[in-house]
């Protein structure tokens, strides 16, 4: 019954003219994707065994070694780490034991972060909170209070603040006087993690720079303003790794049977930010798990695509799409034969479709029809534009920049990405399983059909030519 249905669907949508995968195989992928989906299990492993996976960290290296073994276990071929670069300084953060709290005048546990590639503490460091002085005169008056204290910074911007030059001078003096570090407040209840990887070992940052959640900050400054003494303690387990640190993407394949040099890429970035609390679950453990599960499903079904389906887990995405840009550069001779690059990096929502050229619609429609029949409450759409999207902040952009059709899937659903993305809330508990089942099944079906299509995907006409 299902097979007949799929065939009828294909005829209706004109897929026969384009050529697509075997409808019976598509049906098998969908059945397996729905009944034995393991995306959640991959995500649990990624979050719980490896945690935040900052590029240049040992966490990411361990996760990549695991992913290589997974792809091999599924039956993928040509599984390997592919180097795209190296950085002079790596960085690791303990995935547990991160402590930040006020212990007096009352106990309050903080939600906090520090920039990656900055130093942590040597064990638990307790000290009084001292407000950032308004001027050097202010500092000089209270000079003895700074040694061993945590200096609570005034807001970054606002009325009545000293100039940046004054604040810099005061901060330098406070550091010289022996503060443990500085503590700033975030603008809201989200604490966002970032950081600068582009540092030298010999001049790596020496000063501790903590940001606590606004309500935590208000509790500390409220106590100080009331004339109470506030005691803070932090245990920041973070360390630099002396490089050069080799940086890799993870690559695996199901080789094509007729046109192995033509390629459809299914991908997501495996690296994440690593702030305390974050497991890099939604950005982008989900897209990575979906990529892994697509590979597992396709191998389990034993697909024989005409073209090669290549699975790639990028790294260096968060610092500037480095893994995918490096890949484009290192494979520049092959770009004409990459049909499509699918990128899952929009969180835990489901694959709601694709943005591309009108000429590409019929290549995607049969997959979307089959998926919508299987996941009735998760509609998909193909949104046609005159040109492929430019920019867009994830790895598809690296390919669109050189004319290879890159697709950032239209993530659709109820997830609140802004609450999670790069914050302390990027945890396993935010994942929505039913969406992950659809996403991984969609990745498998779409890549299989594109790999069996009558031709490579049409591209934007080259301008000026
Ligand atoms: Zn991301």
Image: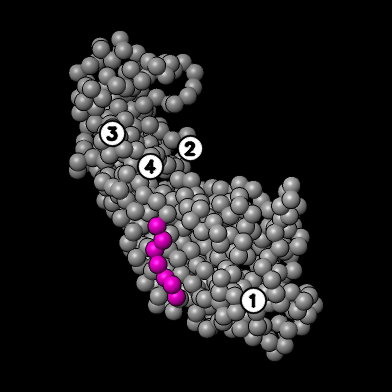
Q: Mark 2 or mark 4: which comes first in sequence?
A: 2
What are the residue bounds of the magenta stretch? 77-83
Residue 231 horizontal/vertical position (percent) = 25, 32
Residue at 74% x, 65% y is: 361
- Marks counted in the figure total 4
Q: To which residue does mark 3 refer?
A: 203
Q: Distance between the residues labelled 2 and 4?
A: 25 Å
Q: To which residue does mark 1 refer?
A: 452
Q: Are marks 3 and 1 in contact (CB under 8 Å)?
A: no
Q: To which residue does mark 4 refer?
A: 197
Q: How far apart are marks 3 and 1 (CA)?
A: 53 Å
Q: Mark 3 or mark 4: which comes first in sequence?
A: 4
- Ligand 1 lies under 8 Å from the Cβ of mark 4: no
Residue at 48% x, 63% y is: 312
Is 122 or 197 nearer to us in this picture?
197
Q: Mark 4 or mark 1: which comes first in sequence?
A: 4
Q: How crowded is mark 1: few (under 14 residues within 10 Å), some or many (20 or more)?
A: many
Q: Which of marks 3 and 2 is in front?
A: 3
Residue 160 horizontal/vertical position (percent) = 46, 15
Residue 126 horizontal/vertical position (percent) = 21, 36
Residue 384 horizontal/vertical position (percent) = 74, 57
Q: Are marks 3 and 2 in contact (CB under 8 Å)?
A: no
Give SS at disc 2: loop
Q: Do the residues labelled 2 and 1 touch (CB within 8 Å)?
A: no
Q: Is residue 253 visible?
A: yes
């Amino acid at each position: 019954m299902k097979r007949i249905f799929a065939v009828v669907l294909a005829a209706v949508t004109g897929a026969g003219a384009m050529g697509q995968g075997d409808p019976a195989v598509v049906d098998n992928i969908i059945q397996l994707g729905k009944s034995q989906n393991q995306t959640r299990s991959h995500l649990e492993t990624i979050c719980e065994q490896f945690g935040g996976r900052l590029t240049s960290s040992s966490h990411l290296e361990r996760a990549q070694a695991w992913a290589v073994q997974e792809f091999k276990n599924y039956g993928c071929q040509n599984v390997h780490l592919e180097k795209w670069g190296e950085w002079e300084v790596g960085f690791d953060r303990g995935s547990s034991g991160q402590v930040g709290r006020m212990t007096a005048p009352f106990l309050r546990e903080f939600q906090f972060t520090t920039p990656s590639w900055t130093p942590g503490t040597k064990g638990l460091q307790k000290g009084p909170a001292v407000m950032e002085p308004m001027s050097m005169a202010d500092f000089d008056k209270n000079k003895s209070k700074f040694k061993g204290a945590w200096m609570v910074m005034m807001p970054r911007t606002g009325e009545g603040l000293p100039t940046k030059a004054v604040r810099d001078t005061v901060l330098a003096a406070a550091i010289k006087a022996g503060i443990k570090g500085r503590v700033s407040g975030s603008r809201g209840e989200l604490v966002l993690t970032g950081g600068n990887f582009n540092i030298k070992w010999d001049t790596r940052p020496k000063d501790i720079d903590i940001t606590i959640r606004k309500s935590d900050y208000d509790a500390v400054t409220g106590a100080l303003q009331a004339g109470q003494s506030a005691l803070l303690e932090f245990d920041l387990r973070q360390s630099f790794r002396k490089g050069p640190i080799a940086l890799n993407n993870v690559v695996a394949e199901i080789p094509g049977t007729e046109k192995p040099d033509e390629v459809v890429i299914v991908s997501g970035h495996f690296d994440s930010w690593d702030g305390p609390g974050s497991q890099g679950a939604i950005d982008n453990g989900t897209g990575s798990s979906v990529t892994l599960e697509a590979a597992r499903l396709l191998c389990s079904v034993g697909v024989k695509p005409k073209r090669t389906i290549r699975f790639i887990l990028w790294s260096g995405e968060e610092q500037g799409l480095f893994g995918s840009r490096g890949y484009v550069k290192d494979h520049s001779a092959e770009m004409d034969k990459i049909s499509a690059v699918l990128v899952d990096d929009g969180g835990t929502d489901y694959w709601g479709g694709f943005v591309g050229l009108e000429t590409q619609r019929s290549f995607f429609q049969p997959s979307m029809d089959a998926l919508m029949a299987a996941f009735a409450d998760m509609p998909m759409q193909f949104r046609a534009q005159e040109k492929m999207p430019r920019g867009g902040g994830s790895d598809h952009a690296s390919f669109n920049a050189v004319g290879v059709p890159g697709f950032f899937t239209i993530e659709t659903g109820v997830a609140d990405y802004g609450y999670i993305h790069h914050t302390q809330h990027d945890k396993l508990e935010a994942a929505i399983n039913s969406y992950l089942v659809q996403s991984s099944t969609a990745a498998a079906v779409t890549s299989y059909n594109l790999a069996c299509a009558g031709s490579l995907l049409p591209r934007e006409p080259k301008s000026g030519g």
